[in-house]
Image (cartoon, helix red, strand yellow):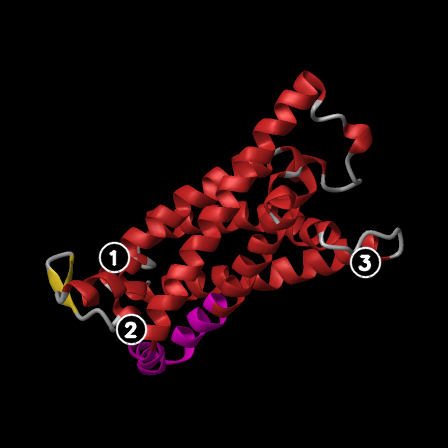
Amino acid sequence: MKGFSKSSIGKKVIMSVSGLFLILFLVFHMCMNLVVVFSDEAYNKVCEFLGTNWYALIGTGILALGFVVHIVYATILTIQNRKARGNDRYDNQNLPAGVEWSSKNMYALGAIVFLGLVLHLTHFWSKMMFAELAGCEAVVDGQTIAPTNGAALIHYYFSNPLFVVLYLVWFVAIWFHLNHGFWSALHTVGASNTVWIPRLKKISTVFTSCVMGGFALTVLIEFFKSL
């Protein structure tokens, strides 16, 4: 097992599996966000259900670990790729048609995704789960908000045009990163024949557009509600 994790193939598999795990979380998070479009009360019930219960804390820890593993192995593979190929590491002849740009810029896109995640954690996680663990309430624009009142935070941040733009840019970066990463991960773990690769690319585009479209829809609806 140790030898596998140190091999190039092993590193790619670990990065792919951790990426697929993070994708499942994105689907759950997107579905949860859409709830607030229909009902603040229902959304807050979901927030209260998750809260700081043991299963939510364990899930958050596993999620954080998966994210760290994904970043670490992506960094290692990027460094190895640059050392091995030098200036020729982006030879377009070896790249699948239609994914040249995202394939070349996966690590840069990942950096934007990470910065967006920091913003998101500052806006929501720190004022919800972290605040509940610390036994305090969040203060936003001079108003005290309970840690389980996620709807109020969504209304506040997504009524600000600057944050709306920043989140939409973040979603676009995730779309490109996810669109390439989804089919590439499945390719790495075994779906590698010439019949399934084109299908996986199409499935990846539709799937990624639905997931990120759901996130963007929530932000835009909340913004227009505030006008």
Q: Which residues are magenta?
A: 29-49
Kindly give the residue lying farthest to the top in the view shown.
87
Question: Residue at coordinates 69% horizontally, 56% vertically from top-left?
Answer: 205
Indicate whether residue 83 is drawn in magenta.
no
Magenta span: predominant SS is: helix
**Residue annotated with mark 1:** 126
**Residue 8 % position (x, y):** 67, 37
**Residue annotated with mark 2:** 51
Query: Could you tell me if residue 225 is visible in this image?
Result: no
Q: Earlier in the sequence, mark 2 or mark 1?
A: 2
**Residue 100 % position (x, y):** 72, 36
Q: Earlier in the sequence, mark 3 or mark 2?
A: 2
Question: Residue at coordinates 72% horizontally, 20% vertically from top-left?
Answer: 88
Query: Could you tell me if residue 97 is visible in this image?
Result: yes
Compared across the picture, whether 189 is left or right of 119 comes to right
Depth check: give the residue in front, 172 or 125.
125
**Residue annotated with mark 3:** 199
Compared across the picture, whether 120 is left or right of 15 comes to left
Give the image quarter of residue 64.
bottom left
Question: Residue at coordinates 29% horizontally, 78% vertically from top-left?
Answer: 48
